[in-house]
Image: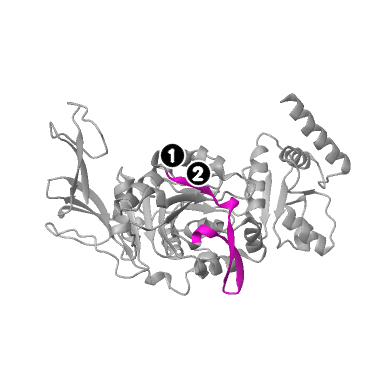
């Protein structure tokens, strides 16, 4: 499909959305060309960073209105050939659509190419967005508000009533979902459409057993059709934060902690068997590098992914971005070979563009490394916030260790700091002494003061009772000053 915006009065054309003609101030209409033919071909045999796989073709397409559009393809065409985008033949097919200025049309096209998307006017919908911490839209941490706006308009096209839609999310443990959606611009979109936002952490929850594992799952999940709307990101802990990871926050805090304690690669696939969802994923910007939080950087992918199967969608995202497919995605895919996945809309080889993977031991501070041993989201969030507050303070390198998989060997490494209740509980069971521990239940200012002291301490880092008293006094003084 080729889209142009046409002035109704003077017939001027634009390739991007515009409401009023800049020449005559007339209203514009959207012109969609669907009868498309190939009118030009260029074969490219030299690779580049953005286009590493060769050879490929750039074909020039023209619709019935004379509008033209270039497109990358690995297939060979002849001048005059019809260009047709075929629908998926399998229920687990993935559609991947390039965004050409209009996210709304890209979402519609992505859904339209699948045979597994069905909605009725009476359906009740839960849109599970991604809004994990308070961050601005340009940081690519949370679902793009423009993406949510477009998705809601697409649902209205299917005659879904706005009163039957809720947008829901649970921020990372330790963060507030309302703060996250407000800063991300998502709350504004909800108000614009008169759609309710629900903080999943407030429940209610209902116990559900899947594959021998018990989950306390958000009760609305059992009453509504779930549209999973994640932002596609790298994740230093899991490899990627995508469609599968986004659904893990449909359970309560206690269950999340237990899932990571028992091994997230084993427990997420069990949860996936219990949740029936359809994913429309936001890769308009996407994230690369040290995701999934504010240490990552925008990838500017300009894509929309759609699929009935969340794990299949994550697999194609990894293949398109040259990232390793994480174990939790492989296991959640339930024996469907990656090579057998059907991709429609854009060809996988034509999409391939390598992005920066996350480095599992790096933090936002150059002197602080991390060893993650099955840390829960609370520890992940705490580590990210504390290390980002250390910017500007330098010292000798320390290594933060977090998670329930901690071993005695790790504790023998130089300048180790234990962070979070999971790790502290585990070293208690190991009966090993460690003088550098930061508990979750301390005030955030006290945690920052203690970590700064450890960073600046030479030799073996220690936290004494005197240090704890000093941190409390500084915390109280800071509150008095404020």
Taking the magenta stretch, the answer to whether it contains residue 184 is: no
Look at mark 1 in the image and give the residue it sits on.
191
Q: Residue at x 67, y 47 (%)?
A: 382
Relative to residue 304, is residue 207 depicted above or below? below
Choose between 379 and 368: the one closer to the eye: 379
Look at mark 2 in the image and give the residue it sits on.
297
Relative to residue 448, is residue 210 depicted above or below? below
Image quadrant assignment for residue 395 = top right
Q: Is residue 380 left or right of residue 420?
A: left
Q: Is residue 29 left or right of residue 357?
A: left
Is residue 366 visible in the rendered image? The answer is: no
Relative to residue 6, is residue 25 depicted above or below? above
Is residue 97 visible in the rendered image? The answer is: yes
10 Å crowding of disc 2: few (<14), some (14-19), many (20+): many
Query: In x, y percent, where is residue 419?
Result: 73, 51
The secondary structure type at the circle numbered 1 is helix
Q: Residue at x 42, y 55 (%)?
A: 125
Q: Residue at x 63, y 40 (%)?
A: 388
């Amino acid at each position: 499909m080729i889209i142009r915006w046409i002035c109704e009065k003077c017939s001027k054309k634009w390739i991007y959305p515009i409401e009023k003609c800049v020449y005559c101030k007339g209203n514009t209409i959207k012109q969609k060309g669907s009868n498309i033919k190939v009118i030009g071909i260029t074969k490219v045999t030299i690779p580049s960073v953005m286009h590493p796989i060769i050879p490929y073709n750039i074909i020039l397409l023209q619709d019935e209105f004379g509008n033209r559009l270039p497109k990358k393809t690995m297939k060979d065409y002849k001048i005059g050939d019809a260009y047709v985008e075929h629908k998926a033949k399998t229920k687990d097919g993935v559609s991947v659509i390039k965004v050409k200025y209009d996210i709304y049309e890209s979402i519609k096209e992505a859904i339209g190419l699948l045979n597994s998307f069905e909605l009725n006017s009476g359906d009740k919908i839960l849109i599970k967005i991604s809004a994990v911490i308070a961050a601005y839209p340009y940081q690519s941490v949370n679902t793009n508000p423009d993406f949510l706006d477009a998705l809601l308009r697409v649902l209205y096209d299917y005659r879904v009533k706005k009163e039957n839609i809720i947008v829901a999310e649970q921020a990372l443990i330790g963060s507030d979902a309302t703060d996250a959606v407000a800063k991300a611009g998502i709350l504004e979109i909800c108000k614009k459409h008169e759609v309710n936002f629900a903080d999943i952490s407030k429940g209610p929850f209902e116990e559900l057993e899947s594959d021998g594992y018990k989950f306390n799952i958000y009760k609305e999940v059992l009453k509504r059709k779930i549209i999973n709307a994640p932002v596609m990101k790298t994740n230093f802990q899991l490899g990627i934060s995508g469609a599968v990871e986004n659904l893990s926050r449909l359970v309560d805090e206690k269950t999340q902690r237990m899932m990571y304690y028992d091994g997230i690669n084993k427990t997420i696939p069990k949860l996936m068997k219990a949740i029936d969802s359809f994913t429309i994923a936001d890769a308009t910007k996407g994230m690369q590098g040290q995701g999934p939080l504010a240490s990552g950087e925008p990838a500017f992918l300009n894509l929309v992914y759609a699929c009935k199967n969340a794990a299949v969608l994550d697999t194609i995202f990894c293949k398109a971005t040259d990232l390793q497919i994480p174990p939790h995605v492989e296991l959640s895919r339930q024996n469907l070979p990656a090579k057998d996945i059907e991709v429609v809309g854009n060809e996988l080889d034509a999409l391939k563009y390598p992005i920066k993977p996350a480095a599992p031991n790096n933090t936002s501070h150059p002197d602080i490394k991390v060893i993650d041993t099955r840390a829960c989201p609370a520890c992940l969030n705490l580590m990210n916030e504390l290390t980002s507050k250390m910017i500007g303070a330098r010292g000798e390198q320390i290594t933060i260790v977090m998670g329930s998989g901690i071993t005695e060997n790790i504790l023998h490494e130089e300048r180790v700091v234990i962070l979070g209740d999971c790790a502290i509980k585990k070293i208690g069971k190991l009966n090993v002494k460690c003088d550098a521990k930061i508990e979750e239940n301390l005030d955030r200012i006290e945690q920052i003061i203690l970590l700064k002291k450890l960073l600046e301490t030479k030799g073996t880092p220690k936290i004494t009772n005197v240090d704890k008293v000093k941190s409390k006094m500084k915390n109280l003084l800071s509150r008095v000053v404020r």
